[in-house]
Amino acid sequence: MLALVAALFVFFGINVVNVALIVEGVHNILGYDSKPVGLAAIAIGALLAIYGHDAMHRAFKWSLYATLPVYVIVTVLAMTHAGGGAAGAPMPNLGFNWVAFLTQFAVSASYNIGYAPYVSDYTRYLPADTRRKPLIAAVFVGASLSGAWMIALGASLAQSLSATNVLSAIYGLGNAAAPGFGALLVTVAVVGFVPIIALNTYSATLTVLTGVDCLQPMTPGRRARVTTIIAISVLLAACILLLKGGGLNLLNLFLTTLLYFLVPWTAVNLVDYFFVRKGHYVIPHFFRPDGIYGSWQATGIAAYLVGFAAMIPFFSIFDPSTGKAVFVGFIAQRLHEIDIAWLVGLIVSGGVYYGLSRKLDLDAERALVRAHEHV
């Protein structure tokens, strides 16, 4: 259940951030209330989620075809300074700073660790004979290259153009290269957000229904799925209408907090997969309360809670809009507010889970795995 709560926090929170970035960017460009644009994106995303996985998959394919050239163009413009007149004076070079470096490292780690629930959700749609190594390589390469590219591009835009919103930066770069080109780039970029909003809404729906099923066994049908999608979308719209502050500040605060919730869960998953069960599971037993995995995994829950508790003294949470501390643990204060809580969580949760797992009857599990593999 803890993992479900953390996953729901990821899916819903990223949707809030994405729609906030759309609203803020369009407002900065056009100068008027752009919340209707955000609400329209939420509505279209909900519709895609209702149509289901296959519709979203097709939308993502066409979104990739449309947006990849946009970000290649933006990268080229940023590297060649073709949009040098797009914004104000560049930010001064402040030199290397360990606190800033480790803060950015933590945010980058959060960005990639945030993919874990998506991988967990959508590998279920792959054919049963999908080979493990190519799958791991595809996830690693896709997540690392896209993250490195977008984070580096964002840092470049922030440094050279004093950009605080990606859509505003794209608009400025495009128009500096050719009149009206910025509007075209922004339009394509906004459309590219819609499948992501749909994905998070769909994933949040799966998470909610799974959580309900854990507490009260049920067989959710179309009605339950559609009702949950609508409820999540309405709540998302309410958050956008009530939201105060910039999208970039919200993104920074969200990624920091997200990291704290996901790190212990990720550590448990990684240790279980690579060191305890070594990738061998009896899949049908995932869905059986009386199966070998049971309804609740006390070992995993204990490792999560111990790891999370160990992280608290290392928490370093700031409100980027004011620069004021939201919460800084007593050890983080002694470390000049450097954020290494995520590293502590990985080590402690992973170590505790590995130690507790030594009591598991893995020989019996492996025998059952072999029996199911030969069915």
Image: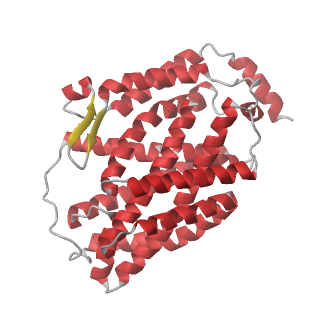
Can residue 145 be seen?
Answer: no
- Which residue in the rendered view is the most extreme toward the bottom? 179
Residue 299 shown left or right of residue 260 in the figure: right
Up/down of 133 relative to 289, above or below: below
The number of numbered discs placed on residues in the rendered structure image is: 0
Residue 264: x, y in percent? 47, 30
Can residue 110 be seen?
Answer: yes
Residue 313 shown left or right of residue 335 in the figure: right
Q: Quadrant of residue 59?
A: bottom right
Up/down of 42 relative to 221, above or below: below
Q: Residue at x 30, y 81 (%)?
A: 175
Up/down of 54 relative to 232, above or below: below
Q: How is the image coloured?
A: secondary structure
Residue 121: x, y in percent? 62, 45
Residue 229: x, y in percent? 62, 53
Q: Residue at x 80, y 35 (%)?
A: 373
The N terminus, quarter of image:
top right
- Which residue in the rendered view is the most extreme toward the top? 359
- Which residue in the rendered view is the most extreme toward the right? 375
Residue 254 shown left or right of residue 226 in the figure: left
332 and 40: which is toward the camera: 40
Q: Quadrant of residue 173?
A: bottom left
Residue 266: x, y in percent? 50, 34
The C terminus, quarter of image:
top right
Residue 233 shown left or right of residue 255 in the figure: right
Q: Residue at x 56, y 24 (%)?
A: 300
